[in-house]
Image: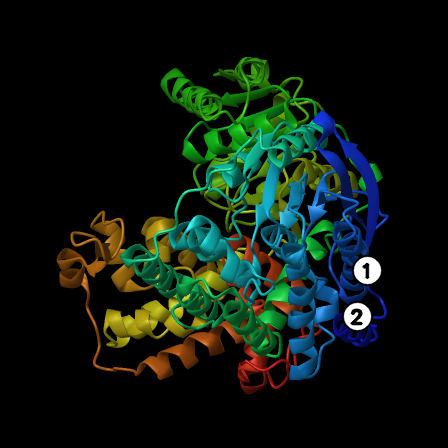
Amino acid sequence: MSTTAELLKGAAELFPDEVVTQAHVRHLDLPFGAGRFALVTLDNGLDHTKPTTFGPQSLANLNAAVDQVEQEALAGSIVGAGITGKPFIFAVGADLKGVELLKKHDEALAIGKGGHDVFKRLSALTVPTFAYYNGAAMGGGVEVGLHCTYRTVSKAIPAFSLPEVFLGLVPGWGGCALLPNLIGADRAVSVIIENSLNQNRQLRGKQVFDLGIADALFEGADFLEQSLLWTANVLNGATEVVRADVDRGAAWDAAVARGRAIADSKVHGAAPAAYRALEIIEAAKDGDLQKGFDAEDAALADLIMGGELRSGIYAFNLVQKRAKRPAGAPDKNLARPVTKVGVVGAGLMASQLALLFLRRLEVPVVLTDIDQERVDKGVGYVHAEIRKLLDKGRINRDKANRLTALVTGVLDKAEGFADADFIIEAVFEEMSVKQKVFAEVEAVAPAHAILATNTSSLSVSEMASKLEHPERVVGFHFFNPVAILPLLEIVRGERTDDASLATAFGVARKLKKTAVLTKDAPAFVVNRILTRFMGEIQNVIDEGTPVATAEKAIEPLGLPMSPLVLLELVGPAIGLHVSETLNRAFPERFTVSPNLKRVVEAGKRGFYVYDSGAPELDPEVAALLVQGDSVLTEEQVRDRVLDAVAQEIGLMLEEGVVAEAQDIDLCLITGAGWPFHLGGVTPYLDREGVSERVNGKKFLAPGLASVPA
């Protein structure tokens, strides 16, 4: 047994529940007389919803397949070898369930070395090797292909990435060393650092080709056939593969510097993975691949044993698993069909909602508002966005025409909503206005129609209280920008029935949103926590702490933006409105900042100006601030803010706002951009000791309570 096989056998004993990927070898005669060819297909034997992964036994199976191919190559019985995946899936990397089980540094090191030892054998074969990226490829799935001589990619691939930094790792099976040497450091930084830290942005097939990762691009329908024809031409010499030279001079250094700036802006030094990846990319400049592989092994082992990866895996499991089975959702069989959608309002938020419903449900969508000018503007926005999708090639002409025809606008609610199954309002955030709208809608809508509100903080029960049928009213709170943020808080009012709630969850699934059921409590989940968080920041500023100190105090959390930049994104007026709503509900904990009121009354859109590019305190805002003389340190500010958040979450769980702490974590990750590397707010508060300091106990999010910070 080889050293690699022995290494993998020992590692496999640690992963008894691995979903094992087989590596099937078959042979075929290439066209044009190019010769006999060995094709390895990765397949875990499950349907395409269960992606192929690499655990120790899976790597051992691939290693055995390479053993066979190697012998055939040495014997001269094959002219080349290729690797591809089962339908729709190439491979999506390491089996993260197994990674969670590793307890020792040398065990983690063995996983890194095992992957390297198997994959680099592909580049060491005496015949050319080809990777055929036929479907989704991530992490180790991308990296196994990087070890091959040539690569093709399908236009139909929806997801291609090196997401390791997003999870708290580095691409540790060749990605950091090989990719910059293939496509240049700047493009590699975009894939490894920038895309990962931008909520794990995925590449599509054409982008993979345009970046130079793949040498050829083919349609999905006959991808493998076209790839094999291309392979035959490459082996015959009829097709020459030409790649751009890699700049190993100042451009390489500039790319690494750009990567560090991206990491600093996203995680502020609070998470090590991005910086470790950049160190390996920087060292890969001399082209010494083995040195790069050794550095990847070391980084992988260190990070696997650290808290960031465990946190990232916890967060990953939330958005991949818990999000698909919302706690408390009724039986989906109770859901009613939705064949037409009504939207009350035609402003920006309402227009974004109309576009989302239109694209995902592909049913008629009708907008209403108080005058024709507003209606026309809302419909015009949707039409313009459809044209943009067409121009970008995201939809074809037929679909663009069909979607354009499906959206209309009317002034008369009776005309627009008489046959609508789901009607959502997105009007001014004032209870009396929303009650009036719902009364008008109920008078003309069918008896079965769901009445949904996009309120961010008002009581759904109170909104429905004057209706004849309050049981069909649900909260349907989206987050801005609607097309990007996945979270949808579905709020059950006091009298909402199961059928209405089930229909709401059914619509959420079709909208491809992460739906979390919440109790009808003030500001629900995200806005309540963020308002408490922001309220403490505003309080310490009001009391005398400089704005810069209050902002800088939060940097170690690695949040995607500082509190006052977030306030600017939300809008000071909306922030003030939500704080006033919560102040009425919980005056002992939620304050209304007089300085924020001054900023809103002055018509300012935020605390900052950007004359030099970077945010600077607006002199006009500075002149508005009235501060006390109590100045806190950054550490004191941070403790105070985290204590407030821990207290509020504890109270929310006692009130039953959501089923469990994991739902709060899921809401903040998908609705507020809480960093993956922190693994959710509750385990972070547990690890930092804040939960016990404030509440006398941990939140005990599963699997993370004992992970080091």
Q: Quadrant location of the C terminus?
A: bottom right
Viewer-side residue, 688 vs 245? 245
The percent position of residue 299, horizontal first and vertical second, equals: 54, 74
Residue at mark 2 to residue at mark 1: CA–CA distance: 8 Å
Q: Which quadrant of the rendered structure holds the N terminus?
A: bottom right
The amino acid marked with disc number 1 is: Ala
Disc 2: CA contacts within 10 A as few (<14), some (14-19) or many (>=20):
many
Q: Horizontally, is 354 left or right of 515 in the view?
A: left
The answer to whether one can see residue 553 in this image is yes
Position of 456 compared to 22: left or right?
left
**Circle 1 Cα neighbour tier, 10 Å, few/some/many (<14 / 14–19 / ≥20):** some
- Provide the secondary structure element on which disc 1 rests: helix
Q: Look at mark 2 in the image and give the residue it sits on.
A: 5
Nearer to us in this view, 421 or 437: 421
User: Residue 199's x, y, as percent?
Assistant: 51, 53
Q: Residue at x 84, y 75 (%)?
A: 13
Query: Is residue 86 something one can see in this rendering?
Result: no
Position above or below: 390 against 574 = above
Name the residue type under label 2: Ala
640 sits left or right of 627 in the view: right
Q: Quadrant of residue 134?
A: top right
Image coordinates for residue 470, horizontal then vertical, percent: 68, 39
Q: Is residue 207 above or below residue 554?
A: above
Q: Which secondary structure, mark 2? A: helix
The residue pinned by badge 1 equals 64
Label 2–label 1 contact, CB within 8 A: yes
**Mark 2 / mark 1, whichever is N-terminal:** 2
**Residue 74 in which image quadrant:** bottom right
